[in-house]
Amino acid sequence: GAGVSQSPSNKVTEKGKDVELRCDPISGHTALYWYRQSLGQGLEFLIYFQGNSAPDKSGLPSDRFSAERTGGSVSTLTIQRTQQEDSAVYLCASSLAFTGNQPQHFGDGTRLSIL
Amino acid sequence: GESVGLHLPTLSVQEGDNSIINCAYSNSASDYFIWYKQESGKGPQFIIDIRSNMDKRQGQRVTVLLNKTVKHLSLQIAATQPGDSAVYFCAENNADSWGKLQFGAGTQVVVTP
């Protein structure tokens, strides 16, 4: 079956440019999450969406980061005026529901490199 | 072989042996735990989860043990195979910050023939 799909798989851009990362969650999953993974590190929570509720943006590292989820499905993570420290793998996950004890299923991520 | 905590980066195990990966968590309010496997260039893959009202759960070749008294979690892999070589993460969640999984740095498991 189809899992979480992320695009692009790799993105190389120059410092100062804006980037958009896309996530298609598993069909029927109401909750969607973004994480960031730096080289050789664990995952750092960024933001989550649950249904029509306001997203929890508490993990976003700066106001250069924003995310949207349109129609309760596809999500886009946008990073404005990219910096070299933004280089990381950006992972998206979805879960069947947000009500407790539902495992999050991850895509393969977008590897972002800022030159 | 045995890995203690999430700060020990590598566990080497011989093919066919059992592996034990350990995880220490600090938040006593954590009530849901997940083990993930991550292969190079891939996203984390769900292996098994356990709720805090349980102390053991078994899957196919894997067993997760939870000791809430000492805030310790372990993943046991039976008859380790070359395909088990990967980085393993434990993640925890709690009702105060639901959805924001807290991950450790992971343990690299290397299976040798």
Image (cartoon, helix red, strand yellow):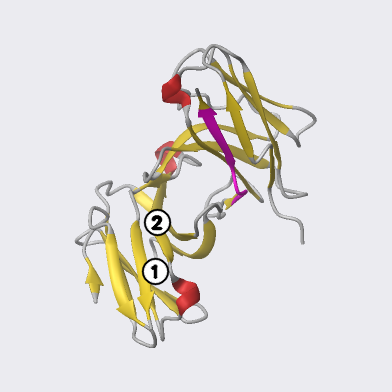
Amino acid type at image mark 2: Phe
Which label sits on residue B89?
A: 2
Pick the residue in front: A100 or B16: B16
- In the image, taking residue B25 as reference, residue A63 lies left or right, namely right
Q: Which of marks 1 and 2 is in front?
A: 2
- Give the residue displayed 55% in from the left and 55% down from the top: A103
The image quadrant where one finds the N terminus of chain A is bottom right
The residue that disc 1 covers is B54
| Relative to B12, residue B86 above or below | above
Under circle 1, the secondary element is: loop
- Discs 1 and 2 lie in a common subunit: yes
Q: Marks 1 and 2, how far apart in space?
A: 20 Å
Look at the image and say whether residue A109 sits in the magenta stretch.
yes
Pick the residue in front: A31 or B37: B37
- Give the residue displayed 62% in from the left and 38% down from the top: A10
**Magenta-tinted stretch:** A106-113
Where is residue B23 shown, x and y percent of the image? 28, 59
Q: State which chain disc 1 sits on.
A: B
| Relative to A23, residue A64 above or below | above
The image quadrant that residue A69 belongs to is top right
Where is residue B17 shown, x and y percent of the image? 34, 86
- In the rendered image, the residue lying farthest to the right is A71
Amino acid type at image mark 1: Met
Which label sits on residue B64?
A: none
Pick the residue in front: B47 or A109: A109
